[in-house]
């Protein structure tokens, strides 16, 4: 009950906010928490005179839910991950950027200029990319960590000391890599085996938490944490003796993208903002802050030199492939939802 | 309505009544918009067809309730059995909320009694002190609680330093941590109504009981408790009901390994599942259950009052 009330109140507040934001010289940004430095927003306002209003979210799914509940027409741009760009495009939530509307479009790095989730970059530009895998405390375990067994079939030293991301997509994709099955399997035997494997693995897990994925490693509450590469690097810098793994079975690759939303109230300003983020110097500021990677040519000169040398950024020779999270069809997704509920019931 | 006020020729009480109804209008409108409308919306949504990845299709469907009560296997085509998953989740929430309420009562009652028996100008100070921690956001208090309780946290350090334990107690990520978190979140809701009741209590009654050779225990049980029961009852409801729907403490302190009702519903809207009708149906079932519990206990209390009087 509380939730329904909260969301309808939020929708009401959004509707009010939308009117305020329709004035000229504004940009309404819907962004992840702690993912853009305030100095960069200030710089944007200084250069263009456009004031920025920002709301934040903590998962792709919660952004989608609040856009569905009335956020479309309120926000100009948001920052979905790869698979969420396909979903939002499928839902008709994205506007198309015509040829020539972005003068810096040519700055997009070759390998990110035509991604599977947005062919031809019709509605999006790269923001940051990186990987999701796991980090292991070297104080707790000194054996081989380059295997997904660490998460799903852990050695005795690590049992009961594992934190997983509280996110169905990331847990399921990693589990699929571990078992060597497709992410959207329709094979019943594979799905039953996946269900059984997760039930067994859960007995060794201490918690599911995304927001404090870094903190539990720094505090020592968890010896293993499923985590993004940049978070693992920050945990190490904050004193945790952790090593980030690139398992031989593979790891999750991701890319967050700035998208132009349908019915953006300040469409022109949204394009100015996207051009601003395609300037190497500006997007490098984000990379230095978040410690991931930019998908823009020429950022190298502006990056903190220490970043390139980070072990979290450099997969070893035996690392498995980096795979994007896949989008399953409705019928298949229903089975995965059921497996997730079984896991957390 | 304004005409009614003029028509009541002689009786001033009528005028007052009319005026009162009129003045209550803003409150009624606010309640209707903020309480009734969302509940009705939720009721309607629970009977609609789910749209893939959130949202609803405006077609009548019982699928959400079917999903709650019937288990059709991993692939949805086994013969229907009774679904225990969600009943288990509800039972877990009731149990956790009940334990937190009991804990709040055991700590809250003596606290309220203590405050109510201070001198008249000290009472507001104590009430003020009780509320101070609650100026801080609930999320921050819950995270702080986790830092206090964790294996290398101050609580374990202290207990090990004084030699009470040899190795740290594992409290974080257990059910007990969740109960502790809920207890801490809602304690003032227990203390304040009981305090209000005890403050009104006439202590001459206790003295009279003592004069009649009642032991202190008997006085508490037979004289004080019956007199302040409405306050205790209100406190229990105010702690129990929000604890049932809470998701912060279970997620942060309990490790989110097992759904509670609150997190199950949250998942339907903010998580991968995106099943709004099911979230609405689970909310409706929760609402109905709370209403039944409240009605049942109100009736029990009314009965007890009648028998007592």
Image (cartoon, coloured by chain):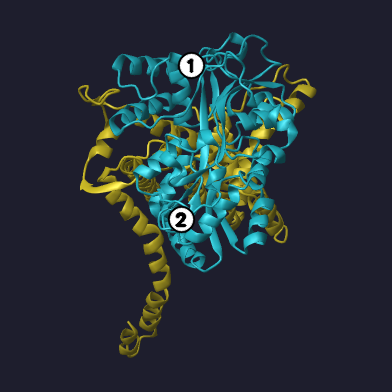
Chain colours: A cyan, B yellow
Residue at 61% over, 54% down? B203
| Mark 2 element type | helix
Residue furthest right as drawn: B161
In which quarter of the view is residue A242 placed? top right
Residue at 42% over, 58% down? A73
Quadrant of the drawing holding the C terminus of chain A: top left
Pointer 2 with pointer 1, Cβ within 8 A: no
Relative to B100, is B33 on the left or the right?
A: left
B57, above or below B29, in the image? above
Question: Can see residue B112?
Answer: yes
> Is A96 in front, or is A68?
A96
Tell me where residue A216 appears, x and y as whole percent.
64, 29
Relative to B290, is A129 on the left or the right?
A: right
Tally the marks: 2
Tell me where residue A278 appears, x and y as whole percent.
58, 47
Classify mark 2: residues with Cα within 10 Å, few (<14), some (14-19) or many (20+): some
> Is A220 in front, or is B220?
A220
Identify the chain of the residue marked 2, using the numbered disc in the image.
Answer: A
Q: In the rendered structure, which disc, 2 or 1, sits on the residue that comes first in sequence?
A: 2
A144, above or below B303, in the image? above
Q: CA distance from mark 2 to mark 1?
A: 38 Å
A107, above or below B10, in the image? above
Classify mark 1: residues with Cα within 10 Å, few (<14), some (14-19) or many (20+): some
Question: Can see residue B109?
Answer: no
| Mark 1 element type | helix
Tell me where residue B52 appears, x and y as whole percent.
31, 40
Query: Label 2 belongs to which residue?
Result: A10
Res A15 label: none
Query: Label 1 belongs to which residue?
Result: A201
> Is A244 in front, or is A109?
A109
């Amino acid at each position: 009950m509380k939730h329904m009330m909260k969301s309808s109140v939020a929708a009401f507040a959004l509707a009010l906010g939308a009117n305020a934001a329709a004035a000229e010289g504004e940009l309404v940004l819907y962004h992840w928490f702690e993912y853009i430095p305030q100095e960069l927003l200030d710089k944007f306002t200084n250069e263009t005179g456009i004031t920025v209003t920002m709301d934040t979210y903590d998962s792709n799914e919660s952004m989608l839910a609040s856009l569905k509940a009335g956020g479309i027409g309120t926000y100009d741009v948001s920052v979905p991950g790869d698979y969420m760009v396909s979903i939002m495009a499928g839902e008709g939530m994205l506007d198309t950027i015509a040829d020539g509307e972005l003068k810096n479009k040519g700055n997009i790095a070759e390998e990110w200029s035509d991604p599977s989730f947005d062919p031809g970059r019709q509605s999006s530009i790269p923001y940051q990319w990186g990987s999701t895998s796991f980090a292991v405390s070297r104080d707790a375990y000194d054996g081989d960590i380059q295997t997904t067994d660490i998460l799903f079939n852990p050695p005795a030293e690590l049992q009961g000391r594992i934190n997983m991301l509280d996110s169905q997509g990331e847990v399921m994709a990693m589990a699929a890599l571990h078992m060597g099955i497709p992410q959207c399997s329709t094979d019943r035997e594979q799905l039953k085996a996946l269900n059984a494997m997760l039930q067994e693995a859960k007995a060794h897990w201490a918690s599911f938490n995304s927001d404090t994925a870094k903190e539990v490693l720094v505090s020592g509450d968890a010896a293993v944490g499923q985590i993004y590469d940049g978070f693992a690097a920050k945990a190490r810098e904050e004193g945790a003796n952790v090593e980030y793994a690139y398992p031989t079975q593979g790891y999750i690759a991701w890319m967050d993208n700035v998208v132009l939303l349908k019915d953006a109230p300040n469409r022109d300003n949204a394009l100015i903002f996207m051009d601003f983020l395609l300037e190497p110097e500006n997007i490098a500021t984000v990379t230095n802050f978040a410690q991931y990677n930019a998908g823009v040519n020429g950022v190298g000169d502006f990056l903190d030199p220490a970043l390139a040398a980070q072990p979290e950024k450099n997969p070893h020779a035996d690392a498995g492939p980096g795979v994007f999270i896949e989008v399953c069809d409705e019928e298949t997704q229903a089975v995965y939802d059921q497996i997730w509920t079984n896991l957390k019931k | 309505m304004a005409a009614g006020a003029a028509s009541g020729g002689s009786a001033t009480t009528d005028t007052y009544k009319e005026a009162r109804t009129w003045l209550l209008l803003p409150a009624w409108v606010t309640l209707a918009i903020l309480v009734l409308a969302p509940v009705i919306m939720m009721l309607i949504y629970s009977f609609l067809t789910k749209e893939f990845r959130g949202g609803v299709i405006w077609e009548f469907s019982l699928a959400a309730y079917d999903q709650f009560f019937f288990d059709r296997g991993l692939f949805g085509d086994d013969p229907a059995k009774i679904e225990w998953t969600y009943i288990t989740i509800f039972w877990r929430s009731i149990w956790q909320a009940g334990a937190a309420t009991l804990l709040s009562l055991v700590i809250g009652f003596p606290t309220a009694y203590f405050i109510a028996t201070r001198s008249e100008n000290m009472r507001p100070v104590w009430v003020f002190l009780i509320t101070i921690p609650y100026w801080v956001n609930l999320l921050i208090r819950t995270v702080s609680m986790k830092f206090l309780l964790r294996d290398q946290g101050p609580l374990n350090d202290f207990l090990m330093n004084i030699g009470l334990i040899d190795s740290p107690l594992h409290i974080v990520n257990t059910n007990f941590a969740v109960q502790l978190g809920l207890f801490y979140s809602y304690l003032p809701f227990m203390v304040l109504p009981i305090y209000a009741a005890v403050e009104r209590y006439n202590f001459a009654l206790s003295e009279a009981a003592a004069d009649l050779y009642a032991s202190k225990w008997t006085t508490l049980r037979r004289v004080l408790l019956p007199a302040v029961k409405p306050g205790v009852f209100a406190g229990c409801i105010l702690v129990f009901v929000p604890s049932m729907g809470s998701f912060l403490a279970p997620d942060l302190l309990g490790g989110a390994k097992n759904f509670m009702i609150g997190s199950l519903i949250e998942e339907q809207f903010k998580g991968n599942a995106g099943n709004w009708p099911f979230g609405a149906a689970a909310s409706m079932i929760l609402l109905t259950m709370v209403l039944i519990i409240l009605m049942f206990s109100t009736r029990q209390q009314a009965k007890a009052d009648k028998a007592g009087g």
